[in-house]
Amino acid sequence: MIGLLGGTFDPVHLGHLRAAEELRESLGLHELRLLPCRPGHRHPPHASEEQRLAMLRLALADNPALRLDERDLRRAGPTYSVDTLAELRTEYPGRPLVLIMGLDAFTGLPTWKDWRRLTTLGHLVVAHRPGAHPPLSAELAEWLAERRVGDAKALAGEPAGRVLLAPLTALDISATDIRRRLAEGRSVRYLVPEPVRNYVERHHLYR
Ligand code: ATP
């Protein structure tokens, strides 16, 4: 099983890495790929694409199970998960692919490009705070009920088609907060890996 965690990673931080490591373990993934995206729907990231890639390379260097996948920045135009999954499905015809997203993203799923096609290409894992039950639209609740499974073993047996809600205790770290601290000249030590902190300092990022 290959797990896929997309994001802006502006910059990558220990919240991302800890979540990736925990999901890799709890879902029994062979590898988990971090895919920096080119957002189409919000203001552009602060760091350049090359800088975001460089920070991810530094952050992932010491863990072979967490890998950088650059495809969404190599493709022209903004990133849509359905395009990412379609490409990977062609490369790995029979392999379970697991698209990971947070609960907030999931509640907005019906606004995504070709969202109903996502589970024809891969599984979905919705990471959520233990005990969180936000309201879902009737349309999404019905779609979920038809696909929902109770544990990760059910994902391993087929390449696509299922949705798993996975509890995850997220560290209280966000890229927005890290950028704010840097803009104010404050420390981000222990919020990002040291090599990333050194890179940010050397390149005067987020000032
Ligand atoms: P920003 O503050 O700029 O919006 P972010 O810190 O939320 O950024 P993203 O690059 O948007 O980071 O996140 C990529 C993915 O990682 C998303 O699915 C997001 O939900 C998840 N994520 C972000 N921060 C954490 C965290 N502290 N713990 C667990 N997951 C996280």
Image (tube, rainbow, N blue to C red):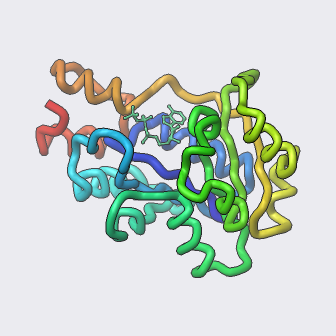
In the image shown, does 61 or 27 lie closer to the viewer?
27
In the image shown, does 144 or 23 lie closer to the viewer?
144
Give x and y (percent) for residue 3.
62, 58
Residue under the image location 27 percent in, 56 percent down: 54
Q: Can the viewer see residue 101 in this picture?
A: yes
Is 77 drawn above or below residue 132 in the view shown?
Answer: below
Locate residue 121: give its quadrant: bottom right
Give x and y (percent) for residue 93.
68, 81
* Image quarter hosting the C terminus: top left
Indicate left or right for 15 with 168 as reference.
left
Q: Can the viewer see residue 30 in this picture?
A: no
Is 33 drawn above or below residue 74 in the view shown?
Answer: above
Give x and y (percent) for residue 58.
33, 53
Indicate left or right for 24 with 41 as reference.
right
Indicate left or right for 73 with 171 as reference.
left
In the image shown, does 69 or 159 lie closer to the viewer?
159
| Mark count | 0
Indicate left or right for 57 with 162 as reference.
left
In the image shown, does 40 or 72 lie closer to the viewer?
40
Residue under the image location 49 percent in, 52 percent down: 6
Residue under the image location 73 percent in, 40 percent down: 140
Residue under the image location 21 percent in, 19 percent down: 186
Give x and y (percent) for residue 166.
74, 39
Locate residue 158: give its quadrant: bottom right
Is 99 drawn above or below residue 2 in the view shown?
Answer: above
Is 122 drawn above or below residue 37 in the view shown?
Answer: below
* Image quarter hosting the N terminus: bottom right
